[in-house]
Amino acid sequence: EILGARGCRRQPPHDIFFSLSARAPMLLRLAASLAMSLPVAAPIAGYLTWKLSSKRPGRPASKRGVPASPGASRLRSRGSQAGAPVATIATTGTDALSPTTASRGSQVKATAVDAGVAARRVVASATGSQTARVVEASSARGPIVGHVPGFAARVAECNEITEADLVEYVPLIVAGKSVGLMQPSFADELVRHGDGVFARVGTREDNAELDWKDGEEKDGDGRASPSSSSSWPSSSPSSSAVVMDPDASMTTEQRSEAAANVTAALRDAGVITGWRDELFPVNESYGDPPVMLVERAAASLLGIRAYGVHVNGFVTAPDGTLRLWVARRSMSKPTWPGKLDHLVAGGLPAGVEPKECVVKECGEEASIPPELAGTAKPVGVVTYNANYQGCCKRDVLFCYDLELPGDFEPVAADGEVESFELFDIPRLMETISRTDEFKTNCAVVIIDFLVRHGYLSPEEPGYAALVKSLRQ
């Protein structure tokens, strides 16, 4: 209609302008709709909105002195009513001017919208007020700078044991597979209470009788040649080792039963504490058949790879930002009492799949129904070599993201959690980077969450090293 009116040579100019002014409300709605649906049309829509909304009483509608039309007067009166929406403008990916008008008597202002930020501005005016309330939803994925050094410090706390430190630990070799790294003092206790189940052997050079992995080349004396790989950790070329069933003549069940007797004796002697009556698999990597099963309380002492699941339970706020549910651990917990924790986390016992463990832990720790817990999405793994009371704690954590409804509130069900609280992203980042309130491995998993959701910028110094450090 606009193009038709402007292109009609027979229609007098003042009639053309009258037609435009009479349709002003319709054009305002059209301009706003274009701006919301087509980002490239925002500048055009803004210009039309400004031209049609800036007609003031007493101002002629055209340079030729034609009085303002009744339609234009109606537009002004509607715009000055209390609570009347004035304009809604959205821009995406480009700089633009976003015209907004407030209540009666206020000036028309052009507000610059930053490039790359999708923001919706709704201006609601109040009767007789010279100010306007602006509700603005900023980008939910914009990087927040300044936290990389603090995050790197948290990750380092979970990776205290370096490759150079591994030479101080005694390898545990079961059925020819290197599955653990132990403190020398615990290795001695294991052998002393082992009753022949576990045996201490000397250095690689002094123990030709030690069985190496199948398929290795051996020299004339039956030793593994220097060029061949072996089950002995390459980082520990001269340390002794503790072996069990070196010729792999026992079944997994037999080795598990023999190990259970030894660990029970160590529990009775006070060497192993915090007994859980939960079995962990012992293998070289996840998915490999276990060489045996051991009590969970012995896992860190044996230095085996332990597996667990951690769930980032988050909600999307009405403004599009994310918020993360955070648990406060019970003061009665034997480990990390009172620390901040994930919504849901737990060790992965033998014979239980990660997703099955997620659903189970969600119900036990936060009263999340199975149908909701089942929507958790696997997003990767975090690994580290932690120094836990002198032990080499080598964990592999399967990470999940679980989006929860905005009105859902977790409820502690098993007594392991004191309370839950919803953290916004700025508070979450500040708490992790500036304090030690979080359990260390939970902080590492949340850092991974922040990286994946775009809250850290690759342009920030230390970003690449931080991301690399999340997986050892």
Image (cartoon, rainbow, N blue to C red):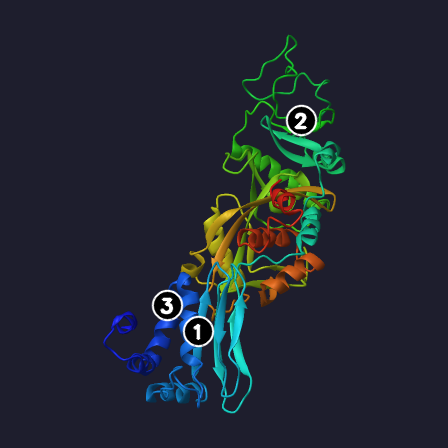
Query: What amino acid is found at the position of numbered circle 1 in the picture?
Result: Thr
Using a 10 Å C-alpha cutoff, classify the residue at mark 1 as few (fewer than 14 neighbours), some (14 to 19) or many (20 or more). many
The disc placed on residue 88 is 1
Numbered label tally: 3
Q: CA distance from mark 2 to mark 3?
A: 65 Å
Depth check, mark 2 against mark 3: the one in front is 3
| Element carrying mark 1 | strand
Of label 2 and label 3, which has the lower sequence position?
Answer: 3
Tell me which residue sits at (55%, 59%) in the image.
142
**Horizontal side of residue 339 vs 277, given as left or right:** right
Question: Quadrant location of the N terminus?
Answer: bottom left
Q: Residue 390: where, in percent of width, then height?
A: 74, 43
The disc placed on residue 358 is none
Q: Nearer the viewer, residue 254 or 420?
A: 420
- Quadrant hosting residue 226: top right
**Horizontal side of residue 121 vs 465, given as left or right:** left
Q: Residue furthest left?
A: 10
Q: Give the labeled residue for mark 2.
A: 234
Q: Give the labeled residue for mark 3.
A: 34
Q: Nearer the viewer, residue 173 or 139?
A: 139
| Element carrying mark 3 | helix
Q: Is residue 126 above or below residue 204?
A: below
Query: What amino acid is found at the position of numbered circle 3 in the picture?
Result: Leu
Tell me which residue sits at (60%, 48%) in the image.
458
Tell me which residue sits at (43%, 61%) in the image.
372
Q: Is residue 64 above or below residue 334?
A: below
Visible residue check, residue 405: no
Of label 1 and label 2, which has the lower sequence position?
Answer: 1
Q: Residue 353: where, in percent of width, then height?
A: 47, 46
Q: Residue 206: where, in percent of width, then height?
A: 73, 18
Q: Nearer the viewer, residue 343 or 91?
A: 91
